[in-house]
Every structure is written in structure tokens, then in C-alpha cells.
Image: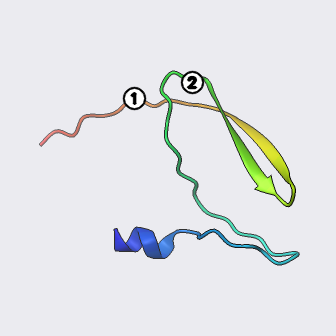
Amino acid sequence: MDSWKSSTIRKTTLESNYNMQGKVFFPTFREAAYVTLFLPVDSQYIEISFKQKQFPTIPILE
């Protein structure tokens, strides 16, 4: 858990001409074909839609 806390991007304000990158994790909705994110940017929201791909789980054999 400590590595997760130290490696995640925290809520912050970026200066002009700066950027961030990284993985984004959010709850899954198995029945959803698409997932739409609404991201606040200044006083507006950017809407990004993703087609959800589902991969079968592979059981771990011991």
C-alpha cells in the first residue's frame, strides 16, 4: 500500500506548458459498453468516452 501512495499522482494544479502522465484507475461496470469521463479543466469539463474491452480472467493453478 505504501508504494501505491508514493507513486500516484496527487490532485494538483499544473503550471502553463507542463503536463503529467500516468495510469488512471476507476471502478469497472461490467454491463457498460462505454465509459465516459468528465474531467474538469479550468471552468469547463472535457468529456472523453472509452469503449470498454473486457478480458476473460485466467484462473491461477497451483
Q: Is residue 30 above or below residue 47?
A: above
The disc labelled 1 sits on which kind of residue? Pro
> Where is residue 28 drawn, in percent x and y?
49, 36
> Would you place residue 27 above or below residue 10 in this image?
above
Give coordinates of residue 24: x percent, y percent.
Answer: 58, 54
What colour scheme was applied to this rendering of the protein? rainbow
Query: How many residues crowd around disc 1 within 10 Å: few (fewer than 14), some, or many (20 or more)?
Result: few
- Tell me the number on the disc at residue 8: none
Q: Is residue 8 above or below residue 62?
A: below
Helix, strand or loop at label 2? It is loop
Residue 32 x, y percent position in the rendering: 57, 24
Question: Is residue 32 found left or right of 45 in the rendered image?
Answer: left
Tell me if 49 is positioned left or right of 46 in this view.
Answer: left
Q: Quadrant of residue 4?
A: bottom left
Residue that mark 1 sits on: 56
Query: Which is closer to the viewer, label 1 or label 2?
Result: 2
How many marks do you count on the picture?
2
Kind of residue at badge 2: Ala
Q: Nearer the viewer, residue 24 or 14?
A: 14
Camera-nearest residue between 56 and 27:
27
The residue labelled by disc 2 is: 32
| Viewer-side residue, 4 vs 61 | 4
